[in-house]
Image: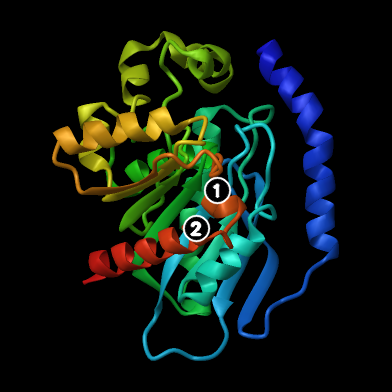
Amino acid sequence: MNPVLAHLMKNARSHSSHVSNVIDENVNIPDDLEEVFDREYLGIDGNKLFADIYRPKGRYISELPIVIFAHGGGLFIGNRKFNRLFCEILAKIGYLVFSIDYRLIDEADAIGEISDVCSAIKFVTDCAEEFGGDLNNVFLIGESAGAFLSLYASVVANSDIFSGIIYKPDRFCRVKGLICISGMLYTTLNDPIGMVYKDDLYGKRAKNKSFMKLMNPNNEEIMSALPPIFLITSSGDFLKRYSLKFAKKLKRENHMHELVYFKNANHLKHAFISMLPLLPESAETLSKIKKWTLNLRK
């Protein structure tokens, strides 16, 4: 493993585990929500995965739009528990939410991690009816590194570009829209993230030029398979350049998208909406997300 990644992982894992334990020990389910924790399912590689599920309490006239949320953490820390408050707020405003896990970088490469998000889509496809979800309206929300994985999982769901590389079950719902929160969208550039992650993410595939071209989201083939995209960033986001760069590409290609960029807002840090969903700016952005997804559902 890259020594920089190994150092970051070693120093962050103990803190990450402590935060997760504190969250677990202070479970207080709101009266207006139903929550299911630790629902187990199998990954495409036969690995065990888990999801936490959130939905508004009671019966609804129509099925609920579905959100599959992939946490951030640089692919070396984090889990589905970290953004519980964000998921609860999404459920309160009318979504059926699946907060998912995926193997981290010491357990799987990029293909394995993307496959885990695809496994979550398969799990949701199979159990949406049980929870009152609408499989015609499935949205992926990815936070930071989770946005990178969600972007490629949406490509797998909506195309056959990765046929033979990532297994796609016959029963597999399409992704209606992709929401990227402070997305770690580029992993192959000649920049610090590209240099640190490349070998661990791609291994021997890094020498395959045709494959590596696909791992740049600006690739025309990838772009053509993407659903409409909603990008969120701020001036205080250390990865804002990725969201802004991708937004420019989407605009040039006339790809349906919306960018929420809080300028002159250095107090809004990386992934502010999912980490601090009670901020006024987070509430404003959540309102825009709801309107955007509603328009796509029409």
Amino acid under disc 2: Ser
Horizontal and vertical percent for residue 194?
48, 16
Is 226 left or right of 16, judged from the image as shown? left
Q: Is residue 206 visible?
A: yes
Give how far across and how far down residue 178 sits, in percent.
36, 50
- Disc 2 is placed on an element classified as helix
Q: Depth check: 64 or 288 in front?
A: 288
**Mark carried by residue 282:** 2
Q: Position of residue 141 (x, y in %)?
A: 46, 52
Picture coordinates of residue 143, whole percent (x, y): 52, 45
Taking the spot 61% from the left edge, 43% from the top edge, the residue there is 102
Residue 7 sits in which quadrant? top right
Q: Residue at x 70, y 11 (%)?
A: 3
**Residue at the image position 48 percent from the left and 30 percent from the top:** 239
Tell me if 118 is positioned left or right of 75 in this view. Answer: left
Say whether residue 2 is left or right of residue 168: right
Above or below, 178 relative to 266: below
In the rendered image, which quarter contains the N terminus?
A: top right
Which residue position holds label 1? 272
| Mark 1 or mark 2, earlier in chain | 1
Quadrant showing the C terminus: bottom left
Callout 1 touching callout 2 (CB < 8 Å): yes
Position of residue 285 relative to residue 135, above or below, is above
Measure the C-alpha gap from mark 1 to mark 2. 7 Å
Q: Amino acid at mark 1?
A: Phe
Does 159 appear above or below 82? above
> Residue at left 30%, top 58%?
176
Tell me the element at label 1: helix
Can the viewer see residue 40? no
